Amino acid sequence: MSVLTSKEPAEIQALSPQTVRADFPALDRIFADQQRLVYLDNAATTQKPRAVLEATRRYYEESAGNVHRAVHRLAAEATELYEAARQRIAKFIGAPSTRSMVFTHGATEGFNLVAYGWARKFLKAGDEILVTEMEHHSNFVPWQRAAQERGAVVRIAPILEDGTLDRVAFARLLTPRVKLVAVTHASNVLGTVNPVAELIAAAHAIGALALVDAAQSAPHLPLDVRALDADFLAFSGHKMLGPTGIGVLYARETLLEAMDPFLTGGEMISKVFDDHATWADIPQKFEAGTPHIAGAIGLGAAVDYLERLGRERVRQHEQQLTAYALERLGDLPGLRIFGRAPERVGVISFALDGVHPHDVAQFCDQTGVAIRAGHLCAQPLMHRLDVPALSRASLYLYNATDDVDRLVEALQAAQRFFHAT
Ligand code: PLP
């Protein structure tokens, strides 16, 4: 892998996105009049480096056995690769043990697992779950459903004009009735990075548990579940260079032990009798059926790749690039950016005067620039912002200023086209 710009010590070298690009075959694709693809939809999913593609291919070509079952060599190799990936990912997020790390199919399954396994078991009528106005549907709808079933209530902490959390309102809503605070670490619409360590400490102070949606932070920020003191934290592999269909739920061991299983079937049992069954130890208790073995191995390779690059270096690069993008987009007349939090990731949502967000995205696509448009799986936030939809450009480690320049050119051309017609 070729990621460093020179022979200086790793800690002080800047990341070279142009060199990093060489590791991503998809970024070689040519679109629109021989223009190279500019991929700016990283908040939806990221491209995959060769190291990830090779790790998954190797599993299928050489070690395709099932895990934890047969005694033959392929099964043993598969189990070893799968559990080694769990160990490396646990270390990557600072988890105290692999027992606290459940493989899921993504962040969404992680939240549902907690909603089924914890909320439906422990919530009582009148209890409250506190979320924020900037949550993705996946960290919102599972709590709505669980609350409806248990007679509990979901409270929503509002945001301020700049897209940061209204901490005064949050503190006011954090009453002893709240049993769970479920908050995103980084917003997939506004880019806002929430002060999750402080929010978790506030939740604990009133005896509530805290869950972190790390779908948009795990790929971009150094993450340490112990330093955060999180009770639950979930993210998806595909947003951090890994395969689709694999993700992680971290939870305190004591909580996982107390929770009910979410899915039942093979792999997650200890003993099965005619009339009842007992459960395997954690984390297997929450991994029913054959897991996404290749996905876990691929995610392990993605984590290795990110660590070789250095997460601080990735963060620094993205911060510089985000500042550049905000400045360039901010200079475009008729373009309004939503979210101006000082602590942020490289997710930039915007509206272009007089042009529907879908038309903006489609026009950009015709110039080889991939961005997203829609309600961004955050309809309550769209209502708050009083927009039906937004366009969104989201940056990652292989993006550089030339990508932002291509986006700006595409938006200028879109303005000329739509305002002339
Ligand atoms: N949370 C946030 C902030 C997200 O941006 C997303 C996906 O866009 C999710 C959760 C859900 O992730 P997945 O669809 O991979 O489960």
Image (spheres, helix red, strand yellow):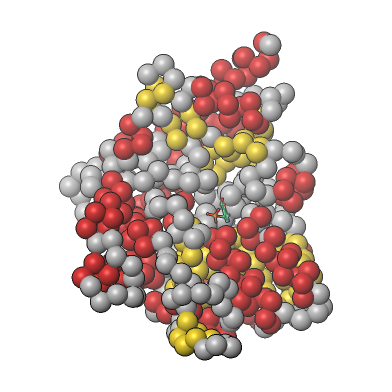
Residue 84 at least partly seen: no
Given residues 220 and 269, the one toward you in this image is 269
Residue farthest to the left? Answer: 7
At x 57% / y 37%, what residue is drawn? 372
Q: Say if 122 sits above or below 25 in the image.
A: below
Q: Is residue 141 left or right of residue 112?
A: right
At x 58% / y 26%, what residue is drawn? 362
Q: Quadrant of residue 294?
A: bottom left
Q: Is residue 380 left or right of residue 283?
A: right
Image coords of residue 262 (percent x, y) = 58, 73
Considering the image in quadrants, where does the C terminus appear? top right
Q: Quadrant of residue 9?
A: bottom left
The mark tally for this picture is 0
Image coords of residue 314 (percent x, y) = 38, 50
Q: Say if 151 sits above or below 274 in the image.
A: above
Residue farthest to the front? Answer: 274
Image coords of residue 353 (percent x, y) = 70, 26
Quarter of the rendered image showing ligand 1: bottom right
Given residues 389 and 187, the one toward you in this image is 389
Q: Say if 303 sits above or below 202 in the image.
A: above
At x 23% / y 47%, what residue is drawn? 1
Given residues 290 and 284, the one toward you in this image is 290
Residue 417 at least partly seen: yes
Image coords of residue 419 (percent x, y) = 68, 15
At x 25% / y 76%, what residue is drawn? 71
